[in-house]
Image (cartoon, grey):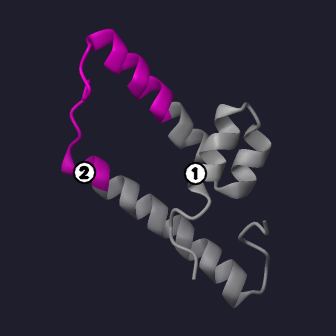
């Protein structure tokens, strides 16, 4: 059973290489995670702090709900309807 973040690393790598189409095929959150990582890195370098922005509990809750919701949709499509919702590698 794939996990909620399965293929997210590959999707992020593809987005960092500029291939957004391939990134979205691996995981829909790939470009989003990549953009967040770039913004975070720029802010961290500019402010000279590892944590340039405070992470609140609600940030983590929203991220968890989004990842689990996306995962449940993919599970339902793949195992419930028989559609190919997870990439074949």
Query: Percent position (x, y) of residue 29?
Result: 57, 50
Vertical comparison of 73 with 49: above or below: below
Tell me the mark number nearer the camera, choosing from 2 and 1. Answer: 1
Vertical comparison of 81 with 54: above or below: below
Q: Residue at position x 26%, y 14% from top?
A: 48
Q: On the rendered image, what quadrant is the C terminus found in? A: bottom right
Q: In this figure, which residue is indicated by the disc labeled 2?
A: 58
Whether the magenta-drawn stretch holds residue 33 is answered as: no
Q: Mark 2 vs mark 1: which is more N-terminal?
A: 1
In-front residue for pair 61/16: 16
Query: Percent position (x, y) of residue 23?
Result: 71, 46
Q: Residue at position x 45%, y 24% from top?
A: 39
Separation of marks 2 and 1 at Cα, in angstroms: 23 Å
In-front residue for pair 78/45: 45
**Which SS type dominates the magenta stretch?**
helix
In-front residue for pair 59/38: 38
Q: On the rendered image, what quadrant is the N terminus found in? A: bottom right
Query: Percent position (x, y) of residue 77?
Result: 69, 79
Q: Residue furthest bottom?
A: 80
Q: Give the range drawn in magenta.
A: 36-60
Q: In this figure, which residue is indicated by the disc labeled 1?
A: 9
Left or right: 9 in relation to 83: left
């Amino acid at each position: 059973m794939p996990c909620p973040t399965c293929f997210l690393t590959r999707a992020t790598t593809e987005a960092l290489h500029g291939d957004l189409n391939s990134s979205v095929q691996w995981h829909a959150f790939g470009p989003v995670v990549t953009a967040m990582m770039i913004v975070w890195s720029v802010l961290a370098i500019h402010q000279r702090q590892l944590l340039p922005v405070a992470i609140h509990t609600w940030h983590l809750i929203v991220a968890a709900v989004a990842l689990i919701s996306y995962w449940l949709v993919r599970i339902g499509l793949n195992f419930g309807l028989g559609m190919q919702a997870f990439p074949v590698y």
